[in-house]
Amino acid sequence: MTILVTGGAGFIGSNFVLDWLAQSEEHVVNLDKLTYAGNLENLQSLQGHCGHFFVRGDIVDGALVQRLLGEFRPRAIVHFAAESHVDRSIHGPADFIDTNIGGTFSLLEAVRAYWTGLESGDGARFRFLHVSTDEVYGTLGPDDPPFSETTAYAPNSPYAASKAASDHLVRAYHHTYGLPTVTTNCSNNYGPFQFPEKLIPLAISNALQGKPLPVYGDGKQVRDWLYVGDHCAAIRTVLERGRLGETYNIGGNAEKMNLDVVRTLCATLDAARPRTNGTYADLITFVKDRPGHDRRYAIDATKIRSELGWTPAESFDTGLAKTVRWYLDNAEWVAHVQSGDYQNWIEQNYGAR
Ligand code: NAD
Ligand code: DAU
C-alpha cells in the first residue's frame, strides 16, 4: 500500500513523512517542487529507505501527477504543498494563486480521473486529505468564540484567500463528483525543520546570533500554537477515521500573544544557553506592523476530539522546550537554509522598517 504526499519536503510535510514511515509499513511517494521552503535535508534520515520515493515536481503539472498516480496506485493523497508564508503573500501573491489555487485544482482533476477508474472497493477506501489553515476564518475580537467548522470564511491576506479558494474547490469536488475528501484547518505549527522566516524559528535563530527579535506592531496579536508532531498525529487520525466531505479544526489549546511567545522563548534560551551580557529579551524590537494583520485566531477543536478522540499531547511549554532543543542541536541545518534567497527575503521584509 502507498500514499502520495505533496509538499513532503517542507516543514509539516517532512515531519509527517518521517512520522509516517516510523510507524507504518506503507510506502510514501513524496511529490515536492523544492521551492525555497522545500529542503531535502529534512529527509536525510530516510536515505536508502525503501519505503520513501521522492519526486521533484510541481502539483500544477497535471500530466506528471496523472503519471505518478497510474504508476504508484496510492490509496490516499495527503496534500500539504502550498506557498505558506503570509508576509511573502503580501509582497508577491502570484505564486500563492498559482500553487494554492491552480495547483490544488490540477491535483484534484488528476485525482478525480484516477479515482473514477478505481475498482469499487478501492474507490470507496480512497481518501484525499487536504491540509488547510485557520486563517481562512479571518480574525476574532478578544471576546469572540473560537473558530469552529461552521464559522463563515473571511480570509484577509492573499495567502488566506488562496487557501480558502482551495478549500472551496475540495468541497466542490466532494459535493459534485463524490470524491472522498476530508479537510483539516489547523492553527500555527511549530517544531523541528521549520524554515526561519516564521516567528518561532526566526526568533530562535536571531537570538542565537544576537540579532533583534522583530515583533510586529504592539505584539498583542493572538495565535493558537500547535506542536507539529501533534498535527501529524491529528492528520493520521483524520485520514483513518474522518467522515467524508467533513472538515476538522485542529488546535493546540495554546492561545498566546506574540509578545508572550517571544518572551517565553527568550526565557527558555536564557536557561538553555545564557548570554554573556544581558538576557535574550533585551533583543526584542518592535517593528512596523504587517499590513492587514489579523488580531486573533483561536480554535474550537471539539469536533475532532469528540468524534475521533484526538487531543494534543504537548503543552506550549513542553513543545517549545523540544523545539528550542532541536534548533540548538541543529545549528548546521539552520546555517544551510539561510541561503542567498533567505538573505534577500530578510532585506525585502525587514530592510525598510
Ligand atoms: P512550507 O512552506 O514549509 O512547505 C511547503 C512545501 O510545499 C515545500 O516543500 C515546497 O517546496 C512545496 N511546494 C510549494 N509549491 C509547490 C508546488 N507547486 N508543487 C509541489 N510542491 C510545492 O509549508 P508548511 O508550513 O509545511 O505548510 C504545509 C501545509 O500546511 C500548507 O498547505 C499550509 O497552508 C498548511 N498550514 C501550515 C501551518 C503552519 O503553521 N506552518 C498552519 C496551518 C496550515
Ligand atoms: O494560523 C496558521 C498559519 O500560521 C498558517 O496557515 C501559515 O502557513 C503559517 O505561516 C502561520 O501564519 P502566521 O502569519 O500566523 O505565522 P508567522 O510565524 O509568520 O507569524 C506569527 C505571528 O507573529 C503573526 O501574528 C505575525 C507575528 N510576527 C511574525 C514574524 C515573522 C512577528 O511579530 N514578527 C515576525 O518577525
Image: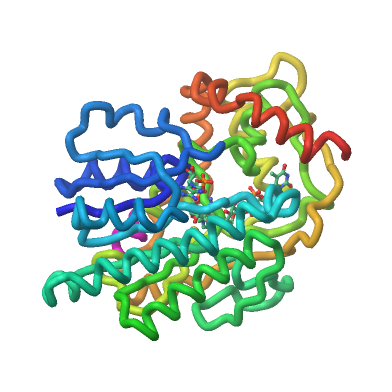
Q: Quadrant of the N terminus?
A: bottom left
Picture coordinates of residue 334 (x, y %)?
55, 26
Picture coordinates of residue 212 (x, y %)?
78, 30
Give the main secondary structure, helix, strand or loop, of the magenta stretch: helix
Q: Is residue 117 above or below residue 82?
A: below
Q: Is residue 133 left or right of residue 26?
A: right
Which residue is found at the position 64% from the left and 67% from the top? 161
In the foreground, 332 or 223:
332
Q: Which residues are magenta?
A: 233-238
Q: Is residue 293 above or below residue 208?
A: below
Answer with the quarter of the image where residue 37 lies. Answer: top right
Which residue is found at the position 52% from the left and 51% from the top? 189
Q: How is the image coloured?
A: rainbow
Which residue is found at the position 56% from the left and 71% from the top? 165
In the foreground, 269 or 346:
346
Q: Is residue 78 left or right of residue 167?
A: left
Q: How many numbered callouts?
A: 0
In the foreground, 165 or 182:
165
Picture coordinates of residue 17 (x, y %)?
32, 44
Q: Quadrant of the C terminus?
A: top right
Outermost residue, front direction?
A: 63
Outermost residue, top direction?
A: 276
Picture coordinates of residue 80 (x, y %)?
43, 54
Q: Is residue 300 above or below residue 67?
A: below
Which residue is found at the position 64% from the left and 20% from the top? 274
Q: Is residue 335 left or right of residue 286?
A: left
Q: Is residue 54 on the magenta stretch? A: no
